[in-house]
Image (cartoon, rainbow, N blue to C red):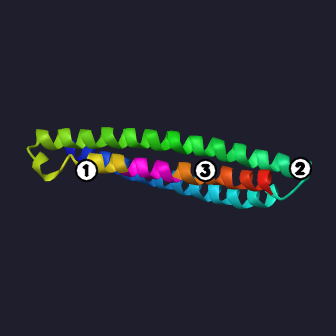
């Protein structure tokens, strides 16, 4: 039974990684698309252009928020799963083979992923806004 629990935890970690990857790539791609579209719309003087500009920014804002919440939950899940593995390894006197400091590395990676998502989101907002205001 212990082996099945171990396999289940490992499988959950894999799903967690895949979900995080999808979140990150989706946010970055959407932010870059929003940057491109809104840069083009920033040169427009039409009401439709302003409305489209605003809608793209709202969409990007919502998706970036969802991604950041998702990454935060993913980080929490990963930590719980790894701590569960460590407890299992300790119970089996195998904990010397797993360095718990790996958890800190994961926390750092999540912070970096969040910074990338936020930075691309901010640029997708600021660059077209600067063009719109100062062109």
Residue 4 location (% of width, % of height): 26, 46
Residue 39 position, x and y percent, is: 75, 59
> Is residue 16 something that shows in the picture?
no
Q: Which residue is mark 3?
A: 121
Determine whether label 1 and label 3 are within 8 Å by CB. Answer: no
Residue 43, image x, y percentages: 83, 59
Q: Which residue is identified by label 2?
A: 48
Q: Position of residue 61 (x, y in %)?
A: 65, 43
- Farthest left residue? 93
How far apart are the alpha carbons under marks 1 and 3? 29 Å
Dot 3 falls on a residue whose secondary structure is helix
**Residue 55 bears which disc, if any?**
none
Residue at position x 13%, y 41% from top? 90
- Badge 2, how many Cα within 10 Å: few under 14, some, many 20+? few
Q: Nearer the viewer, residue 24 or 8?
A: 24
The quadrant the C terminus occupies is bottom right
Q: Mark 1 against mark 2, which lies toward the viewer? A: 2
The residue under the point 48% across, 55% down is: 21
Secondary structure under tag 1 reads helix
Q: Earlier in the sequence, mark 1 or mark 3?
A: 1
Split into 4 quadrants, where in the image is the N terminus? top left
Residue 77, quarter of the rendered image: top left
Q: Is residue 126 left or right of residue 43?
A: left
What SS does tag 2 mark?
helix
Residue 102 numbered mark, or none:
1
- 3D distance between C-alphas at marks 1 and 2: 50 Å
Q: Earlier in the sequence, mark 2 or mark 3?
A: 2
Chief secondary structure of the magenta portion: helix
| Magenta-colored span | 109-116
């Amino acid at each position: 039974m212990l082996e099945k629990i171990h396999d289940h935890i490992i499988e959950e970690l894999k799903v967690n990684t895949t979900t995080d990857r999808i979140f990150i790539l989706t946010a970055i791609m959407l932010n870059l698309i929003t940057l491109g579209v809104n840069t083009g719309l920033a040169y427009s003087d039409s009401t439709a252009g302003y409305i489209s500009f605003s809608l793209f920014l709202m969409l990007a804002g919502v998706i970036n928020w969802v991604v950041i919440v998702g990454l935060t939950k993913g980080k929490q899940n990963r930590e719980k799963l790894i701590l569960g593995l460590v407890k299992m390894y300790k119970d089996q006197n195998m904990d010397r083979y797993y360095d718990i400091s790996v958890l800190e590395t994961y926390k750092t990676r999540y912070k970096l992923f969040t910074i990338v998502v936020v930075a691309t989101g901010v640029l997708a907002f600021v660059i077209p806004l600067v063009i719109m205001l100062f062109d």
